[in-house]
Image (cartoon, rainbow, N blue to C red):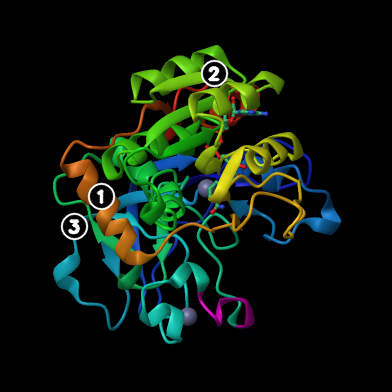
Amino acid sequence: MKALQYRTIGSAPEVVEIDTPVPGPGQLRLKVTAAGVCHSDAFLMSLPAEAYTFGLPLTLGHEGAGIIDMVGEGVDGRHLGVEVAVYGPWGCGQCYACAQGHENYCERAAAEGIVPPGLGAPGSIAEYMIIDDLRHVVPLDGLDAVKTVSLTDAGLTPYHAIKGSLAKLVPGSTAVVIGVGGLGHVAVQLLRALSPATVIALDVDDAKLALATEVGAHHAMRSDAAAFEAIKALTNGLGATAVFDFVAAQATMDLAKAVVRVEGDAVLVGVGAGVLPVGVLAGSYDSSIRAPYWGTRSELFEVLELARRGQVHVETEVFSLDAAPTAYERLHEGSLRGRAVIVP
Ligand code: NAD
Ligand code: ZN
Ligand code: ZN
């Protein structure tokens, strides 16, 4: 089968021909119908050899959807032919976190060497992919795979981030979204669907700011030195109730921290290189800084339900598997609108 692999540190990913995998006991195989391209892939491919821990060659893609076309020993064959979305942050299924569906925070994944598809295990940008357990797929139930696949990360991750601050996002509150790319443009919609907060979107690119307004942001502005005063002005000088930073470079994290009001949240989602000081005198009183990772199994069901109700969607640009390297070039140059989706 064809697959997109990262094969050499520092090189671009390549479309290669590899053996079609066969599911082992307890596993299932998907005939992939759609796979999403995330900035985290670009991040891992930017790492120097000494910091790279994902294995080589690595079949990319941690957003996946497909039709269950083969099951391993012990897996119920009734599920054959069902089209599903992949829950990516695989856990052990046995620990306390996994028992709650919080497999993204599995207590044993690291010790047991359990890694997500596309971030260690073979990923979704291929004609077929192996899923370790039936637990890690959710039926699409009528949703279009191409339009939906990115909700497994670009939807689930902001959903989990926002849910953690939802109790504070009451009428009169303000939420700031920094970076209106794949995750950020879904975050704007989630904030509008889940809360009465005023939503302010920040980006460095005018096309992304236009997209932010299209998908529901009340205000959109450039992410620069003037943004601090502008957000203060829009909040009677109090600052934002919650800032969701999908860039998390030092400059955006500094802005997030500076503009968060008393008892507010700075939620750092982007895998940038910045760090923030915490302390009674280091920021607004009783403010919190969180750095969430991906989302829970039940939250993926909830995000897909929002899509079914038309309350959230992903703006997609579709590429063939042969053109997948181009999708990564477009991601790198920042010219994608929403999310790139690969259709094998
Ligand atoms: P993306 O490339 O689609 O979007 C990034 C957006 O940020 C673009 O619109 C870009 O113009 C904008 N941007 C860049 N610099 C900016 C700045 N200084 N100020 C404001 N906006 C700026 O990326 P994505 O796929 O949406 O991923 C976003 C980030 O989230 C990445 O760092 C990714 O690695 C990370 N991520 C984290 C998790 C998690 O679980 N914590 C999950 C998925 C992705
Ligand atoms: Zn991702
Ligand atoms: Zn676990």
- Residue pictured at 38% horizontal, 45% vertical: 155
Q: Earlier in the sequence, mark 3 or mark 2?
A: 3
Nearer to us of marks 3 and 2 is 2
Q: Position of residue 229 (x, y in %)?
A: 63, 23
Tell me the magenta residue range.
106-111
Q: Nearer the viewer, residue 36 or 107?
A: 107
What is the quadrant of the C terminus in the image?
A: top left
Residue that carries the numbered disc 1 in the rendered image: 304
Residue 85 seen: yes
- 226 in relation to 121, above or below: above
Q: Nearer the viewer, residue 277 or 72?
A: 277
- CB-based contact (under 8 Å), mark 3 and mark 1: no
Residue that carries the numbered disc 3 in the rendered image: 82
Under tag 1, what secondary structure? helix
Q: Nearer the viewer, residue 138 or 219?
A: 219
- Residue pictured at 44% horizontal, 36% vertical: 174
- Give the quarter of the image for residue 278: bottom right
Q: Earlier in the sequence, mark 3 or mark 1?
A: 3
Residue 109 colored in magenta in the image: yes
Residue 60 seen: no
- 239 in relation to 158, above or below: above
Q: Position of residue 5 (x, y in %)?
A: 60, 46
- CB-based contact (under 8 Å), mark 3 and mark 2: no
Q: Which amino acid lies under the numbered mark 2 shown in the image of this protein?
A: Met
Under tag 2, what secondary structure? strand
Q: Earlier in the sequence, mark 1 or mark 2?
A: 2
